[in-house]
Image: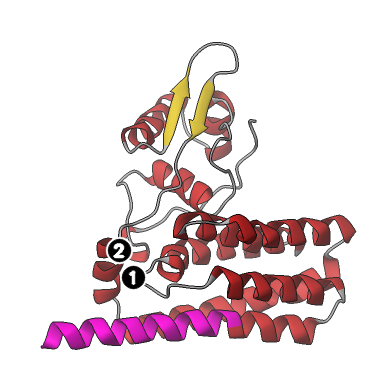
């Protein structure tokens, strides 16, 4: 089914484990990776998608060709045709290790500081502004983790929840910031070579966030969000220290 994509951020090569060297392709990949559009779903038409991203149709077609070459989308002809997502892009463990090797502990910690500031602000606003349907949507998004059977599907489900939380905060600027931060951390958070996050543990955290939003408990929601991000940052720092130690031997 065709749907509007929540536009992903323009990801810099320095802020993600991998990119495709095409800004528009990277934006579409970011949206797919964060669960804005799922495997099996059809992208909007070329005219709609070009308008959404503010580019010419010819430019869009070049970017879609990049994604077809990478096996992320495929174009089907005939009735019911269009361009469909067939794979969630995800870096290899080697790519994740190489990326972490080039980060510093200060950069990882600074990421955590920024993400905690943005995410807790979003959560506070969600406690104030989320209506009943938004809370139901949050719970549905959280429960997608139950069926996640790989790091990439877990990352997609997790990203979809955080986008939904930002949507419920009703702040386009904070939504854009959260998408940028999620695009930087998602693969590192879920890869076995990164933080190797547990889906069961994260599912409980997301349900706790949803319960706190439903109760309009901003203090509780901040605590859960901060601890959730802190766990990821600490695990990444541990992996970084191990990589540095191994490289120094």
Residue 168: name its quadrant.
bottom right
Give coordinates of residue 108: x percent, y percent: 39, 80
Q: Which residue is mark 1?
A: 193
Is 233 contained in the magenta span?
yes
Q: Residue at x 35, y 30 (%)?
A: 65
User: What are the residue bounds of the magenta stretch?
Assistant: 228-249
Q: Which residue is mark 2?
A: 93
**Residue 102 visible to the viewer:** no
Q: Is residue 209 depicted above or below 86 in this figure?
A: below
Please identify the residue farthest to the left as the structure is shown.
249
Q: How far across and how far down the image is residue 48, in percent?
A: 59, 29
Mark 1 neighbour density, 10 Å: few (under 14) some (14–19) many (20 or more):
some
Q: Which residue lies at the image location 52% right of the left edge and 78% below the top edge?
A: 114
Q: Earlier in the sequence, mark 1 or mark 2?
A: 2
Q: Residue at x 58, y 35 (%)?
A: 41
Q: Is residue 164 highlighted in magenta?
A: no
Q: Quadrant of residue 201?
A: bottom right
Quadrant placement of the N terminus: top right
* Disc 1 from disc 2: Cα separation: 5 Å
Q: Is residue 36 above or below residue 215?
A: above
Residues tagged 1 and 2 counted as in contact (Cβ below 8 A): yes
């Amino acid at each position: 089914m065709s749907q509007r994509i929540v536009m992903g951020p323009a990801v810099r090569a320095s802020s993600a484990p991998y990119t495709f060297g095409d800004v528009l392709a990277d934006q579409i990949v970011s949206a797919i990776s964060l669960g804005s559009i799922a495997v099996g779903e059809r992208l909007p038409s070329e005219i709609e998608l070009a308008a959404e991203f503010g580019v010419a149709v010819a430019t869009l077609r070049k970017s879609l060709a990049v994604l077809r070459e990478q096996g992320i989308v495929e174009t089907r002809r005939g009735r019911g045709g269009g361009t469909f997502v067939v794979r969630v892009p995800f870096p290899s463990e080697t790519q994740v290790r190489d990326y972490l090797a080039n980060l510093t502990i200060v950069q990882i910690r600074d990421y955590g500081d920024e993400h905690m500031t943005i995410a807790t602000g979003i959560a506070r606003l969600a406690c104030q502004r989320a209506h009943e349907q938004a809370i139901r949507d949050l719970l549905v998004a959280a429960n997608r983790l139950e069926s996640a059977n790989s790091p990439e599907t877990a990352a997609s489900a997790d990203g979809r929840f955080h986008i939904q939380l930002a949507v419920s905060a009703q702040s386009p600027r904070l939504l854009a910031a959260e998408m940028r931060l999620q695009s930087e951390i998602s693969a590192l958070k879920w890869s076995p070579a990164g933080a190797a996050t547990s889906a069961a543990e994260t599912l409980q955290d997301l349900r706790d966030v949803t319960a706190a939003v439903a109760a309009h408990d901003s203090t509780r929601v901040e605590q859960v969000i901060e601890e959730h991000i802190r766990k990821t940052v600490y695990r990444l720092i541990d992996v970084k220290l191990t990589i540095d130690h191994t490289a120094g031997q």
